[in-house]
Image (cartoon, rainbow, N blue to C red):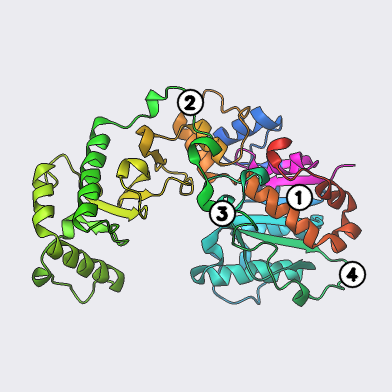
Amino acid sequence: MSFKFVDLFAGIGGFHAVLHGLGGECVYAIEIDQKSAEVYERNWEHNPLGDITHDVSDSIMNVPPHDVLVAGFPCQPFSKSGLQGGMEETRGTLYWNILKIITERRPAMVFLENVRNISGPRHIHEWRVIIETLRAQGYTVCDKPAIFSPHLLPPEHGGRPQFRERVFIVAVRDDDHANNQLLFNAPVVANSPIPGWDPNSWHLETDLPLENKELDKYSLSIEEVYWIDAWDDFVVNMREIRNGQRLPGFPLWGDEWRLETEVRIDKNVPLWKADYLRKNANFYSEHQAFIDFWAKKWDFYGEKFPKSRRKLEWQAQDTPSLWETILHFRPSGIRAKRSTHVPALVAITQTSIIGSQKRRLSPRECARLQGFPDWFDFGDQSDAASYKQLGNSISVGAVWYVFKLAVNAYSDILKKTCPQLVEKVQTAATNPDDVI
């Protein structure tokens, strides 16, 4: 007997991949974006297109009974009036629709995913509202965030070479009210590598793996190659000038290179920016002769270099060349990281660049980064649409791992409310790649 799940804000079906792979049956899915819904239907044979606000309201409940509710939900701000309003405080937010479903359908388990910042100081009010409203409905839930990233898992556990920290909120219905909340004062997963695994041992080319075929359409443009060549010349020569010492970790702002005696910082400039300005002035003053020579050689302040490319964020430690790093062209500049694992995929055009291959990751490689199998089909949609969908998706391996830990952690409660869920999860494969 399988457990039943609903997939809210379903995207292209990352959660579906996990719960179907664990033996669950999807009885409802909802996704407002048409292109994402088409990809979902193509791969999971379930059309999720719709608007949750039309299916869930004070007078409508079109979500069927289920055992598990999963959602990678948008987090709009709640009011700051305090927690006294309970459900009313969340009205007008999409979390209210989730809570309405939970209140009426009473699933055995709720599993929510969101960006790390939802548990940070800027959103502490929203975080408390979520925890307290779930508890008010009779759910056991830890008030400390469970934070995890797929790069903390080895390949044999479904890990991927992507730094993608996400917060997971796990709530289980406790009908007996016998489980003191204090018994669950630790999150179900630690934000650290699993024992015996070193994330620095990732090898992107073989562990992803990178595509072996020609991918000319993802190659860098002539202008992009020029910018990287110029900054690579800077990196290589600066390392020699500094006797092998790596570049500093603060952003190098070419437009702010001036002598320390020439720095003028307005009192309204934020402290972080003032600090960077002083550090850049110190760096320039120390290396003025080479920097001036290099800037003239590459026409750094001419038309070839837009302002957004006159800034370098070096996060690649002792990597000897820029062409051996993973690069991002960001609105704020060029960011370089070590080539062990890539930064988080995002839903905007900042696709990681594989320096050694002078190209961006392909959509298929990005799908692999998120744990989708190679049979996963995007149809004939544009690459831009696929990149966006994958940037908005979950990491299949990370969710598989955390979900299994959660079911095991709360198994005593879940054996009473949904024994088939416990049985399916405890007998499931360690690696989702083996079954998805």
Q: Position of residue 292 (x, y in %)?
A: 9, 53
Identify the image quadrant of residue 360: top left
Disc 3 target residue: 198
Q: Which mark is residue 242?
A: none
Neighbours of disc 1 within 10 Å: few (<14), some (14-19), many (20+): some
Q: Earlier in the sequence, mark 3 or mark 1?
A: 1
Look at the image and give the residue range highlighted in magenta. 1-28
One can see residue 387 in this view: yes
Label 4 and label 2: CA atoms lie apart by: 56 Å
Instruction: Say whether marks 3 and 1 touch (CB < 8 Å).
Output: no
One can see residue 64 in this view: no
Q: Position of residue 111 (x, y in %)?
A: 70, 55
Q: Secondary structure at mark 4?
A: loop
Q: Position of residue 376 (x, y in %)?
A: 62, 30
Type of residue at label 2?
Asn
Vertical side of 380 occupied by 399: above or below: below
Q: Earlier in the sequence, mark 1 or mark 4?
A: 1
Between disc 3 and disc 2, the foreground one is 3
Label 4 and label 3: CA atoms lie apart by: 42 Å
Disc 2 target residue: 212
Q: Residue at x 81, y 48 (%)?
A: 425
Instruction: Say whether marks 1 and 4 touch (CB < 8 Å).
Output: no
Between disc 4 and disc 3, the foreground one is 3
Q: Secondary structure at mark 2?
A: loop
Q: Residue at x 58, y 68 (%)?
A: 126
Label 2 and label 1: CA atoms lie apart by: 49 Å
Vertical side of 230 occupied by 252: above or below: below
Between disc 4 and disc 2, the foreground one is 2
